[in-house]
Structures are given as structure tokens and as C-alpha cells.
């Protein structure tokens, strides 16, 4: 997600730190590199030009040249302007005074509207809201079935009707939603390969039938600068309240996310960061700006951890780790807890400086399949072997290797890693106890 821009801008920011005084030529060179980084990330040319102009104007206004803290001031100006470019503050959901709140999703075919509908329903449930999905895409034969499968997967009701029109389906879905006392109705509409009159007329008719409170445009991040044109075209015909960018995890440039708000005035509301139904995040301009500049996103990491781990599981596992009593059952639990945070590569990028300090090949080297191999080895053990690794003799290890499809060497390596981890944790625990005794004296 925005890897190209993060590496360029994060590297520039790291280079500015500690330099202190900056001349006007230094700032001009720095801003020239910023503009190049933005253009390489597929940011709209005019947006990049205006962004650099605003940073330069602020830099002159704050008289940073020859200032002892010029480097810090320039970083702050770039960060603040990047936040403004991304929309400033968070945009809250426009809740209906009387439920249900109606969310209308629009977009071109292939942008990921149907999958995003399910992701959005799951996100609303995480906020304590009960949602319903309305299958109003009657153009694509598999759309209704796809939405039904997704609805069943996340345990959210899906309203369907045949032999009628999309506006009528939406109207009936709204009535059903009211009857069930649900909080949110998400309307999945049809898309086209390009914007046409039929598409816009159908959207207008659905909007008239349900009177939506949010009208969100779903855009594929990989469309680049074309996303700006699509947003402007939809915005002229439909009163859009926000944009959802999909497939942001698969586009290293992602410049469209910086261009749309500035070029169209439509705020980004959500971002899709993976194929899983849980992979939808609320968009925070400040966090995104700091992440682009290599400052990480620790708050997002904390939120993911709080959602993935129960306090009881965390405390129990922490107790076993710190006393050096961890066994393979605990090791398996630890692996599964970490994997709930998402792909390891994405988790590491949330740590401050990681995206710029670690080379791209190192991040790519975090092979998720290695975690699968470890799980396979542990699951091939008997419950007794998992809880008491000391009994793992040569014949048991060979049996585990055969059962997991891995080599005996891999099994031996994993067992050695567990014992080494236990040894280090015991040493750490003893050292911590000694330090506490010294403090009490």
C-alpha cells in the first residue's frame, strides 16, 4: 500500500532529520524530490504541483531558512500539508435520525463493490450495528449469488428479488430492514465498464426509492489517475458523500488516494487492504500521512491487537512466556494470534521507520507459507507431545515430519527454537527479579 511513495518520502524525511539549518536551495532541492516522488506514485500532476507550492509557501512564511530547527519545521509542514491533502480530519458516518441508515454503493464494474458491501456490513457489526445487504445488481448474473455467499459467510441477511427492477428491490429491502428493526441497509448496485446514461439513471432511480444517507463510490486503487476522472464524473450526477478505495494492498503506487480528495472534493472514507472480508479499514488522514512519511501507524496496530486478542488469552500466554514454561500448544496459539493481525508484511510496515529502513526484498522475504509449515508440524504432534516437548525423541520427530509433510531437519529446528526461547525467557525472568530486588533496597 503506497510502498513506492512511502519509500521515497520516508527516505527524504529521514535524510532531513538532524541537518538543522537548511538554505533556500536545500529546501528547493528537497521539494523537487517530493514532487518527483508524488508523480512516480501516480499522483495527479496538478495535485502534486499545488502540494509542493503550498509547502514552499509555508516554508517561506515560517522563515525556516538558516533556522536551527529548520529540518523539524520542514517535516512538520510536509506532514500537515499531506494530512490536508488527504482530507484533514476523519469524516463520521451520517447516521439516519431514525434507523435504518441507508448506504448506497456505486462504481464501475470490477471495482469490487459486491465484496466491499460485505466488508462494510462486517465493519458496521464491529461498531455494534445490525446490517442488511440489498442485491440490486441485476446486470451481472453472478452478483446476487456472490452477495448471498458473502452474506452467509459473515452471517448478515441478504435481500433479493427477481422479476422486478433495481429501484423496486431497494425499496422492498428498505421495508424489510425496517420490519426487522435493523440499523443499516447497504445497497449493492450494478456497475458498467464505463460511465453511461443508463448507469446514472438507474442510480438516480434507486436513490429516489430509498433516500440514502451515504452515497459511497467504490474505486479500484490500481486505476491510478483515471480514478480522479471517474470520481468527478459520478460526482456530477450523484451527490457522493465519500470514496472507498479497494485493492490498495495490491497497488504499490496508490497515488489516486492522494489525488481524489483534492481534485474532486470527495473525502476518502474507507480503504480495502486485502481480500478477506475483515480487510476494510476506516480511513484516517493523519495516520495515513504519517505512515507515508515512514512514521508508522502504531495506533492502527494497537486497535488490530485489541480486536484480535482477548485480555484473558493475552495474560495467560504472557505468563507462560515470561516464566519460560511455554509449550507447543502455547506456541501455536501465539502464531494464530499474530496471524489475526493480518499479513506479517503489512503488520511490520505499521512500525515506525520499518517501511523505509527495511529493504523491500527483506519485507518480501516474510513468507506466510513458513507459518503454515510450523502449524502443520505442531498439528502433527499428539496433545501430550505439544504440552511436553521433552518427550520428543528421534522416532517421534520422524513420525511428526512424515505426518506434516516436512523434513526431520525442519522438525528438529522448530524444537530447538522452542527450547532456546524457553531458555532466554527464563534468563530474562531471573534478571527482572534481580532488578526488582535491587530497586527495593
Image (spheres, grey):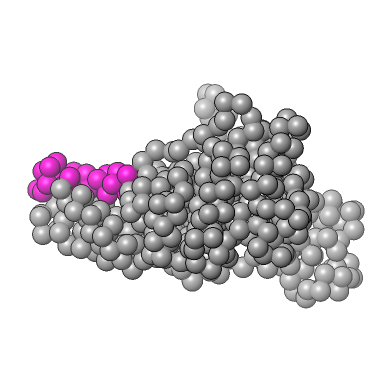
| Viewer-side residue, 433 vs 53 | 53
Q: Residue at x 28, y 46 (%)?
A: 81
Q: Note whether residue 398 is visible.
A: no
Residue 238: image location, x then y, percent: 46, 48
Q: Is residue 96 above or below residue 417?
A: above
Q: Note whether residue 206 is visible.
A: yes
| Viewer-side residue, 292 vs 397 | 292
Q: Residue at x 40, y 52 (%)?
A: 236
Q: Is residue 396 above or below residue 263?
A: below
Examine the residues drawn in magenta and state their main secondary structure: helix
Q: Residue at x 42, y 46 (%)?
A: 267
Residue 74 magenta = yes
Residue 68 magenta = yes
Residue 79: image location, x then y, percent: 31, 47
How many callouts does the rendering have? 0
Q: Is residue 118 above or below residue 380?
A: above
Position of residue 440 in the picture relative to residue 380 (left or right): left
Position of residue 347 in the picture relative to residue 312 (left or right): left
Q: Which residues are magenta?
A: 58-84
Residue 258: image location, x then y, percent: 37, 55
Q: Residue at x 40, y 47 (%)?
A: 266
Amino acid at each position: 500500500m503506497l510502498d513506492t511513495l512511502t519509500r521515497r518520502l520516508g527516505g527524504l524525511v529521514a535524510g532531513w532529520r538532524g541537518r538543522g539549518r537548511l538554505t533556500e536551495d536545500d529546501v528547493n532541492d528537497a521539494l523537487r524530490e517530493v514532487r518527483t516522488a508524488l508523480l512516480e506514485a501516480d499522483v495527479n500532476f496538478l495535485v502534486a504541483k499545488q502540494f509542493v507550492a503550498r509547502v514552499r509557501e509555508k516554508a517561506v512564511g515560517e522563515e525556516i531558512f538558516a533556522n536551527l530547527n529548520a529540518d523539524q519545521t520542514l517535516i512538520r509542514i510536509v506532514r500537515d500539508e499531506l494530512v490536508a491533502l488527504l482530507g484533514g480530519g476523519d469524516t463520521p458516518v451520517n447516521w439516519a435520525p431514525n434507523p435504518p441508515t441507508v448506504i448506497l454503493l456505486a462504481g464501475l464494474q470490477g471495482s469490487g463493490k459486491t465484496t466491499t458491501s460485505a466488508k462494510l456490513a462486517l465493519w458496521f457489526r464491529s461498531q455494534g450495528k445490525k446490517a442488511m445487504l440489498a442485491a440490486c445488481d441485476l446486470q451481472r448474473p453472478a452478483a446476487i449469488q456472490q452477495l448471498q455467499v458473502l452474506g452467509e459467510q459473515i452471517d448478515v441477511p441478504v435481500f433479493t428479488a427477481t422479476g422486478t427492477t433495481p429501484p423496486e428491490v431497494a425499496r422492498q429491502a428498505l421495508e424489510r430492514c425496517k420490519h426487522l428493526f435493523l440499523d443499516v441497509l447497504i445497497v449493492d448496485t450494478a456497475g458498467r465498464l464505463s460511465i453511461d446514461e443508463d448507469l446514472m439513471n438507474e442510480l438516480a432511480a434507486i436513490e429516489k426509492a430509498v433516500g440514502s444517507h451515504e452515497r459511497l463510490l467504490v474505486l479500484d486503487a490500481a486505476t491510478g489517475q483515471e480514478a480522479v476522472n471517474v470520481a468527478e464524473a459520478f460526482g456530477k450526477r450523484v451527490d457522493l458523500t465519500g470514496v472507498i478505495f479497494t485493492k490498495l494492498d495490491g497497488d504499490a503506487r496508490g497515488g489516486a488516494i492522494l489525488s481524489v480528495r483534492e481534485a474532486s472534493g470527495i473525502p476518502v472514507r474507507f480503504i480495502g487492504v486485502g481480500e478477506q472480508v475483515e480487510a476494510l479499514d476506516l480511513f484516517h488522514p493523519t495516520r495515513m500521512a504519517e505512515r507515508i512519511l515512514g512514521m508508522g501507524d502504531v495506533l492502527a496496530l494497537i486497535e488490530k491487537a485489541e480486536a484480535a486478542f482477548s485480555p484473558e488469552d493475552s495474560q495467560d500466554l504472557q505468563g507462560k512466556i515470561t516464566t519460560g514454561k511455554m509449550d507447543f500448544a502455547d506456541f501455536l496459539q501465539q502464531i494464530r494470534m499474530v496471524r489475526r493481525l493480518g499479513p506479517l508484511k503489512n503488520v511490520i510496515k505499521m512500525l515506525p521507520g520499518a517501511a523505509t529502513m527495511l529493504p523491500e526484498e527483506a519485507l518480501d522475504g516474510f513468507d506466510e507459507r513458513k507459518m503454515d509449515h510450523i502449524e502443520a508440524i505442531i498439528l502433527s504432534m499428539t496433545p501430550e507431545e505439544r504440552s511436553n516437548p521433552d518427550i520428543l525423541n528421534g522416532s517421534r520427530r520422524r513420525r511428526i515430519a512424515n505426518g506434516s509433510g516436512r523434513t526431520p531437519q525442519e522438525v528438529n529446528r522448530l524444537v530447538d527454537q522452542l527450547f532456546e526461547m524457553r531458555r532466554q525467557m527464563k534468563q530474562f525472568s531471573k534478571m527482572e527479579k534481580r532488578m526488582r530486588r535491587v530497586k527495593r533496597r
